[in-house]
Amino acid sequence: MKGFISIYWIIAFPFACFGQILVNDTITRFAPISYEIQGNQVMYSAQMPPLNQIAGAPKAFYTYYWEMGDGNYSFKEKPEHQYNKSGTYTTRLWATNNYDNGKPPSSRPQSVSIGKVNDEATLQNVISPFTEDQDLILKRNREPIPDQEMILITSYKNTSNYVSSGKLYLFYNDNQFKNDNFILEDTRMYHGERITTLDALSAAQNYSNDQHTLLASLDDFVTSHKRTFMQDSTKRKNLPLTLEESKALYRNHQMIEFNNMKPGEERNIFRTLRTTPEMIKDTSAIVTLRSIYVPDENFDNHTVKDTEMEIVTSHDPNKMSSNGWLMNYRLVRFKRLKFKVRFQNNGEGPANTIRLEVDTPEMFDKSTLRIDGMYPDCPICPKEKEVNYSCLDTTLQKDKIIFQFNKIYLPGSQQKNVSEIDSTKGFVKYSMKFGNDFHKKKTKSRTAIFFDKNEPIITNYATTRFMPGISIGAKAGYITSPNLNNYKEYFLGATISPFKSYKAYYQAELFFSSGSYNETRDFETRNVQADGTVNLIRLRESNNFNTTSIYAVPGSIRYNLNNFMAIGTGIQLKIDATLNNDRETNGTGFQIIQNGNERPNPDLNSFNAEEIDDSFTNLQTGVFIGINLGTVRIGPSLGIRYVYSFDSPNSQIQFYGIWKF
């Protein structure tokens, strides 16, 4: 150890001298594994590095996850494990630093050799994690953080009374996210399982299901899944349909086959999933994994289990999340938005009362509150009646919802004789609908968690936001210009903007117009004759313009003051696609004699008529400001806009109507 420290300082000292380049977050922390063998019994422990406490957070602590190398695992700090066969086993440790700055410490896998095992010594009292009706359990060692490892434990059981062979599927990387959230780095199996490829066509041929029914059912599923998450675990009978559903929801999958599983036998598979640097960074978003267990390959009965996980930026067991991280505003009016508040008692004793004060934006209809799950599991407290049993009390206030667990027992993670860390955790899952008049705006909610009479722990913000969406508008109107005579111009076009924006938003426009106006110009010409007289011609030029023009508003900023009034400003471009000018020029001649008097000279009178055509000319750039009245967020409204052009004619006034869809 001393040699390692010396080498470290030899390498690190030059960097420390030049600008203190090294910082704590860049230094890898190690947790070396140590063990003691007594026969086939091994006692494990690890030397943990000091924790870097997050300021203002509860006391930092480690949680542990061990793989014993024989298909068993433990979440204890110092596990004792008994091996049933002689051999060499590779033990791994993943420690998680809760309320700690920096990355989790890493541990080098440790090889342990077990000698001859006596039959009597192989007996050990193992508590099964399965309940009577369970055949599939999923666990993980931590929540996903970008660019970190996470271990997924898949436990499966043969609940039949005969030896069976079957399949296990894992689907990951939700299609609803643009980037992949996980890379499957390693799969560790200990019972002869093998990884194979998923061939949906051959799988479908093994079952006599009507193809049209399958496709129709799939369409119904995808539509319903957009409205809500699937329930956590379900029993199903149509395996081809489930596989097609899953491929529609996830980009990646893994299929594992197993053989000769005895009645009542339980097995574990361990997968290392590394979260990608590009994974979604929204700390209130929920990502999912789907596991499918087919206990007997001769039948299509199977179990589907969807696992929801919250994105985190640090390992904090107290957290709030929502599935409304990005919603379609057109489709959410009748959607139930889901929320989940997780908590953990990190004290040295049990908690009997836990109160969750959840900030709730006014756009949600609290009367539609529905509790979808909780732990500790207990009934809802009756209103206006005091009871002496465990229950969950719910109180609705103007800006918050209060959940309170009464008369419960939630052990503390630092409590003596508490070895199962999951027993110290709890949650409340609930859902609500939006109110009748809700706007398209981002919301933020967080929870204050009170354990008995202790100071509250404040969670992260759970955000809900909407996709911009697209709103196409039809626009028509009339344009006049104070600088031109008899100016008349009518236009028709379209707008594009985000759907039903709440306050500020961008809008682009394109419309075509047909217009006409008159322009008169007076001027004169003079010619001096040899006798000193001057020929004067006074001319009047009359122009009758007819134009078809293209208007473009590449970007404008609009702001909805309320539901019925909006203002906006932006840049307008205009070009005349065609320009026709009927020009007439009348000249009246005069002769100016030496005394300066003018004498009409009909011989100098003139008349000229011509037609001038041009195209794509008179490019004008201007800025505008305007106001709209009506149902400005969606639907019809009337508006007026003043445009100032940088080229003559400088002023333009537009009167228009618009209907946004």
Image: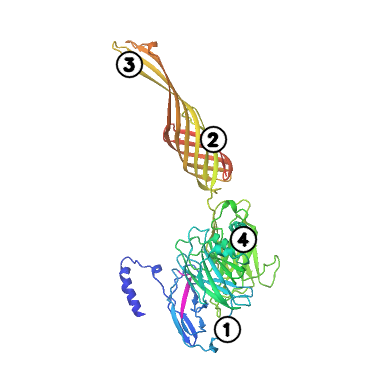
- Which residue, given by chain and number where applicable, does mark 1 sit on? 125
- Which residue, given by chain and number where applicable, does mark 4 sit on? 431
- Which residue, given by chain and number where applicable, does mark 2 sit on? 477
Task: Give the left or right position of residue 393, taking residue 271 as reference.
Answer: right
Which residue lies most toward the left here?
Answer: 530
Q: Earlier in the sequence, mark 4 or mark 3?
A: 4
Q: CA distance from mark 4 to mark 3?
A: 92 Å
Residue type at mark 1?
Answer: Asn
Q: Earlier in the sequence, mark 1 or mark 2?
A: 1
Q: CA distance from mark 1 to mark 2?
A: 84 Å
- Region rendered in magenta: 89-100
- Which residue, given by chain and number where applicable, does mark 3 sit on? 527
Residue type at mark 3?
Answer: Asn
Q: Earlier in the sequence, mark 1 or mark 3?
A: 1
Query: Magenta span has 266?
Result: no
Pointers 4 and 3 in contact (C-beta within 8 Å): no
Q: Earlier in the sequence, mark 4 or mark 2?
A: 4
Q: Main secondary structure of the magenta part?
A: strand
Q: Is residue 58 visible?
A: no
Residue 566 placement (x, y as % from top left): 54, 43
Query: Magenta span has 95?
Result: yes
Q: Earlier in the sequence, mark 3 or mark 2?
A: 2
- Residue closest to the eye, 452 or 60: 60
- Residue closest to the eye, 399 or 204: 204
Q: Is residue 500 above or below residue 2?
A: above
